[in-house]
Image: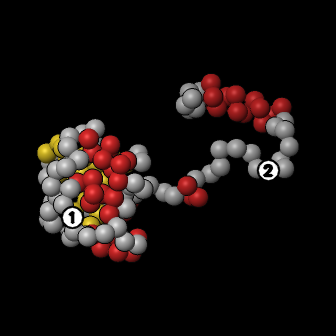
Amino acid sequence: MRLDKWLWHARFFKSRSSAGTFTASGNVRINGTRQTRSSARVRPGDMLTFALHGHVRVIEVLSLSVRRGPAVEAQTLYHDHEPPSLKPKSERDRPPAQRAPGAGRPTKRDRRVQDAFIEKGNYQS
């Protein structure tokens, strides 16, 4: 099965064209070999390594699929070898970057704390 098609079936990408673009840019390795073709063949037992959404994914292909099914079916196509401690936290677990709605304008003290934080270099623009 084609690499781009399998990544789409396994629901790593929302569209097959985005999976093809990603693989054609050389971001995927099959068994340690960099692939620049989206038509590269994937077989059960292959190890895929690629960076997606800010972290490296190490995926073992368990089976192939004829169609793009529901998410439950897609999860049976692969085994994720990434340790649970390295998996990113969801967006809901992170503290909000903005003030709470209805909190009003920042006070003079709040503004000074924010300026000190930015001047320390902890803020990336």
Q: In the rendered view, how is the structure colored? A: secondary structure
Q: Quadrant of the N terminus?
A: bottom left
Q: Secondary structure at mark 2?
A: loop
The residue nearer to you, when weighing 48 against 87, is 48
Quote the CA–CA distance across marks 1 and 2: 45 Å
- What is the three-letter code of the residue carrying label 1? Val
- Identified at 24% across, 51% down, the residue is 49
Q: Which amino acid is tagged 2?
A: Pro
At 14% from the left edge and 48% from the top edge, which residue is drawn?
Answer: 32
* Horizontal relation, residue 9 to residue 123: left or right: left
Query: Does residue 83 appear in the picture of this structure?
Result: no
Q: Kindly state the secondary structure of the residue where label 1 is placed.
A: strand
Q: Is residue 107 left or right of residue 119?
A: right
Q: Position of residue 73 (x, y in %)?
A: 35, 75
Q: Quadrant of the C terminus?
A: top right
The residue that label 2 is drawn on is 101
Mark 1 surroundings: few (<14), some (14-19) or many (≥20) residues within 10 A? many
- Give whichever of 123, 48 is nearer the camera: 48
Q: Nearer the viewer, mark 1 or mark 2?
A: 1
Label at residue 61 = 1
* Residue at point 20%, 43% (across, down): 37
Residue 62 location (% of width, % of height): 20, 69
- Residue lying farthest to the top in this orientation: 119
Quarter location, residue 22: top left
